[in-house]
Image (cartoon, rainbow, N blue to C red):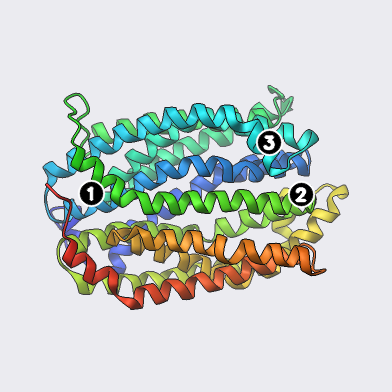
Amino acid sequence: MKKYKTRSEFIVKENLYQVLWTLSLPLMLNNFIQTLYNLVDAFWLGQLGHEQFAATSFVWPVLYLFISIGMGTSIAGTSILARLIGGRDIERAEEVASHLMVLSLIFAFVFSVIGYNLTPAILNFMGAKGNFFQFSKIYLQIDFLSFPFVMVFFALQSILAAQGNNKAITMANTLAALTNVVLDPFFIFDEFMGVKGLGMGVAGAAYATLLSKVLLAVLGFVILRKGKMEIRLHLRNFKAKANIFHEIFRVALPSTLGQMGSSFGFIILNAAIASYGTITLAAFAMINRATALIIQPAMGIGGSLAAIVGQNLGAGAFSRVKESLKKAILLSLLFTGMGGLLLLIFDKEFIHLFISRSGEQGVIKEALVYLWFSIPTIPLMGFFSVFQGFFQGTGYTKYSMYMDVGRLWLIRLPMIYLFKNYTQLGSQGIWFSMTFSNVAVILYAWWLYRGGKWSSNYKKRGDIPS
């Protein structure tokens, strides 16, 4: 492989398969490591019972609703910074990076306080009751304490990802995830491997995750300060500029609204599933973890595609932009197809990894039904991530919003309502609705891409204003 002076030059000149693989691999590992937080919590809590296991999945959309603010600004940051770096406007890129961090800090503390205090009301709205309510409340409130550290790392991750520096992100996440893996059993159980534990149950899992998130934010700052970077943070001499805040909000708003709409949709979805009982909810949580694990490579490809598309657009290499999408789709299909096949072969083994108690046969049976609905659409979930990354890289984040919101609010939730109230399908109505919505949204994404408005409008719009 030819040597390039900068990572940006590599992105706009090297063979696209090589670029995709080089940038995606660290993100694939990073995304896989991120799933370890939930997988590890779920694995150990599953030993306590299906209600403790289901609680972590039940509250996830609530936290995600608040985190979507940070994710939206992070996506906007990656898109704007990648185009500025591609156009070699480093000074402007550093200004944007500083504004991005300041916004993240403000949002972090405001929404952490709001979320913590609203937790009981939110869980009541979702229909949680009895012990399940208590487990969910404990886990969610402690998770909100980690919110500022998560938001800070999102901003740091955006700055690093825009430079194509995904290895550093992976290193930080690896160390934080390993910390969580080690702490979890000692915080959850009274005793583990002959060593006295804290016996905190659900709270122990949440506190272990909190400590790992603190470490993650610290590592992110160290990497950005000490590493070899094209752009750096300059917060000491920060001077707010309205036009930069405006540009971040302009790019972030569609993605943020899309993420928030998706999150609130999942809150409604979880409430609907909870109405069938905690057995159905536990089955839903279990299979979602399986599919989430399988699509991590595709999510890594989609994440790297945002930087690749952004930098090539910034450099005016429009033919490479379209070529990068085609190659990303092929790579995604390869990984998700292999993962789906493995899940098909080892379906029962995966389920017994989380729920092995003899009294939980109802959960196992329901999980197998949902699994068979999910497997055929796993490649489509990968395509979803690829198209999301592509549209984010073009700066047309509103297309990502349409995909997020449309899949849930226009297709999935109405179908679930109709199946529940007008058929005798029971929980199978949920599984069919989810499968059909995944098919429909990919057809819509392809239609948006083929329309070509993203390319013509980008040329007219230009870059970030000075």
Q: Residue at x 46, y 51 (%)?
A: 259
Amino acid type for the residue under numbered disc 1: Leu
Amino acid type for the residue under numbered disc 3: Ser
Residue at the extreme right: 359
Q: Which mark is residue 65?
A: none
**Gap in angstroms between the C-alphas marked 2 and 1:** 44 Å
Q: Where is residue 330 drawn, in percent x and y?
A: 41, 74
| Residue 372 appears in the picture as rendered | yes
Amino acid type for the residue under numbered disc 2: Ile
Q: Secondary structure at mark 1?
A: helix
Mark 1 lies on residue:
81
Q: Residue at x 17, y 56 (%)?
A: 463
Q: Residue at x 56, y 49 (%)?
A: 264
Q: Secondary structure at mark 3?
A: helix
Mark 2 lies on residue:
355
Residue nearest the observer in this picture, 153 or 59 = 59
**Gap in angstroms between the C-alphas marked 2 and 3:** 19 Å
Question: In the rendered structure, which disc, 3 or 1, sits on the residue that comes first in sequence?
Answer: 1
